[in-house]
Image: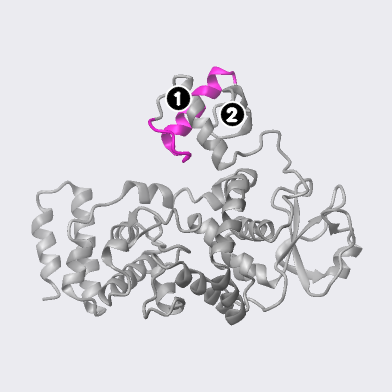
Amino acid sequence: MRSFFLAFALVFAAGLPAEAASFSQCVAGLKNAAIKAGVSRGTVRKALDGAKESEKVLRFSRQQPEFTTPIWDYMAFLVDEQRVADGKRMMRKYDRVLRRAEKQFGVNRYVIAAVWGVESDYGRETGDNFLPHALATLACNSSRRRDFWRGELIAALKIADRGEIRMKDLYGSWAGAFGQTQFIPSTYLRLAVDFDGDGKRDLVNSAADALGSTANYLKNAGWRRGETFMIEAKVKPGYKGPSGRNKRSSLGTWTQRGVTKADGSRLSGGGSAGLLLPAGPRGPAFLVFRNFNAIYSYNNAETYALAISHLADRLAGYPALRTSWPTNDPGLSRAERLQLQKLLLANGYDIGKADGKIGPITRRAIAAAERSYGMKPTGRAGRTIYRKLGGR
């Protein structure tokens, strides 16, 4: 019976274009691999029958914002006043859950909440990609990470097969992460916890399970109870000393190199830290500690870990960054991005419905507007074009 799906696909694919036939054959192989791994045929059929290659998934896989977006755009979008205010409100609502997670796992509750806020806007934006189809698309189109995506697909099917998450709830990011704090399937199998005591690990419908699972993840990633994770710092003009997340020195050594807190006061305390200068020595500087590396492991991007860390600080009552980003065209908040789209529509640019999401159609319209003002057509949602179009 193992060859049934492959044989069927070969017959079916005979009448399809070459690309569709190739994908169909690949999916048939994935079905066989899942059944061999112990997933029931019924679950495999329900998840993968009729699977189609997703252009959106492929596009996002080539344009990950952590590595392609200017840091001032990335931070303006992820740590805006709306996300801070919403986070404080959600922390009040789930105060007992967050404090219990902090006590049980030793992880700072503001960091747990910040992951929740960045990953899904506190459970409101968990992703609209059907995981089996998204992961099949990646498994059939990735030469470097094919085995990884195949493994995540099989893990997702095991989750559904066991009834831990219903198939209809298996929607998430282009990369297969799902739930309110966006676990990939293999991480879910290893580290998700039932934190609300109902006998299920439901990261989709239970905020408590999502928050407890995130705390458990960070603990297993090396989080140290009671230790800090980041300090906004300031370097002297023309700084050319060492930098890097893992080039750690004592705070006393950083003081000798002319590094201070962002407000100019002297560094104090123990522990060792690395210095991050994501926009060079003229921009904000950050001293990052071992716990920052635990946050980093969640997404393997320093910009991501900086956004989580700064949002956590804001939720705890600390101010916005004291040092401005070294640009004359800062990024826009989510509210401003939505307003930018409304301004484009008002100025005759057909982008469809304004939703605050800057996709290819909006970027083309921005580029056209930039050309009309004699600007270089970047397609970037920055403050200059925002103001040119009438934004304030």
Whether residue 321 appears in magenta in the rendering, the answer is no
Q: Is residue 210 left or right of residue 22?
A: right
Residue placed most toward the observer, 51 or 16: 51
For label 2, the residue is 386
The C terminus, quarter of image: top right
- Name the residue at 52% across, 49% down: 65
Q: Considering only vertical position in the picture, is 28 above or below 121?
A: below
Give the residue type that dot 2 points to: Tyr
The local crowd at label 2, few if under 14, some if 14 to 19, many if 20 or more residues have their Cα within 10 Å, is: many
Image quadrant assignment for residue 40: bottom left
Whether residue 360 appears in magenta in the rendering, the answer is yes
Q: Is residue 221 left or right of residue 17?
A: right
For label 1, the residue is 345
Give how far across and how far down residue 189 sits, in percent: 40, 77
Element type where label 1 sits in the image: helix
Task: Confirm whether residue 338 shows in the render.
Answer: yes
The N terminus, quarter of image: bottom left
Residue placed most toward the observer, 173 or 238: 173
Q: CA distance from mark 2 to mark 1?
A: 13 Å
Image quadrant assignment for residue 131: bottom left
Q: Is residue 24 left or right of residue 242?
A: left
The region drawn magenta spans: 352-374
The local crowd at label 1, few if under 14, some if 14 to 19, many if 20 or more residues have their Cα within 10 Å, is: some
Give how far across and how far down residue 39 sits, in percent: 23, 76
Task: Confirm whether residue 300 shows in the render.
Answer: no
Give how far across and how far down residue 187 sits, in percent: 44, 73
Q: Is residue 328 left or right of residue 69?
A: right
Give the residue type that dot 1 points to: Leu
